[in-house]
Amino acid sequence: MFVDKLKCRTDSELICALYEIVEELELRNPGRRFTPDGHLVGSIGETIAARLYGLTLYTASAETHDARSPCGKEIQIKVTQVGRTSLSSEPEHLLVLYLSKDGSVSEIFNGPGKLAWNAAGKMQKNGQRPISTRKLKILAENIAIADRISIVKS
């Protein structure tokens, strides 16, 4: 019965429910954080990006790129809920999305990966180069429409 109710919900409704559960767990367990992060947020973002932009996802944890666009571009998808993200290699095309707790998604960066890679910070010990969402938004302002991948489903 519970599973049937979940199947009737949209992805946004399920994400909202997930954050309601997180909030309840944190209320019941003071001093403990139950923040969805890492693979969970990444997978949520990748599936949302695939639907929105018509992308074909590669198998999980593929190196450098997560998907192929309908026009043939190799895409790295990054999803964040904070003011930064990190890159471990230079992608052909980079798509960075912000995932809100209500399940809504907004585009931060959609353009040539080289722009973000060249603007990212120094390589850290973990093999990642950080870049702020603020810097990505500034870079995104100068990306031509022809250099972006298009949304195919809203």
Image (tube, rainbow, N blue to C red):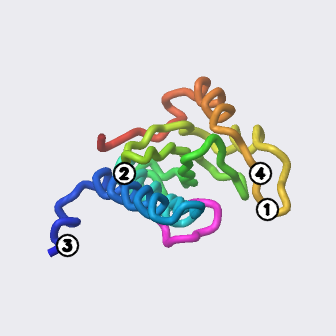
Type of amino acid under label 3: Phe
Q: What span is colored magenta in the figure?
A: 57-66
The answer to whether residue 120 is above or below residue 51 is: above
Report which residue position mark 4 lands on: 129
The residue labelled by disc 3 is 2
Q: Residue at x 54, y 47 (%)?
A: 81
Question: Disc 2 residue type?
Answer: Gly
Q: Are marks 4 and 2 in contact (CB under 8 Å)?
A: no
Q: Give the mark nearer the N terminus: 4 vs 2.
A: 2
Give the residue drawn at x 51%, y 65%: 29
Residue 106 in which image quadrant: top left
Specify the label residue 41 is tagged with.
none
Is 3 situated left or right of 74 in this image?
left
- CA separation, marks 2 and 1? 30 Å
- Residue, x 49% and y 67% (percent of image)? 58
Residue drawn at x 28%, y 53% as measured from the top left: 13
* Residue 56 visible to an observer of this rendering: no
Looking at marks 1 and 3 on the same chain, the residue that comes earlier in the sequence is marked by: 3
Q: Position of residue 116 (x, y in %)?
A: 69, 41
Nearer to us of marks 2 and 1 is 1
How many circles with numbers are drawn on the protein? 4
Residue beneath disc 2: 54
Q: Nearer the viewer, residue 151 or 21?
A: 21
Name the mark nearer the viewer: 4 or 2: 4
Residue for badge 1 = 127
Secondary structure of the residue carrying numbered label 4: strand
**Dot 2 surroundings within 10 Å: few (below 14), some, or many (20 or more)?**
some
Distance of label 1 from label 3 (alpha carbons): 42 Å
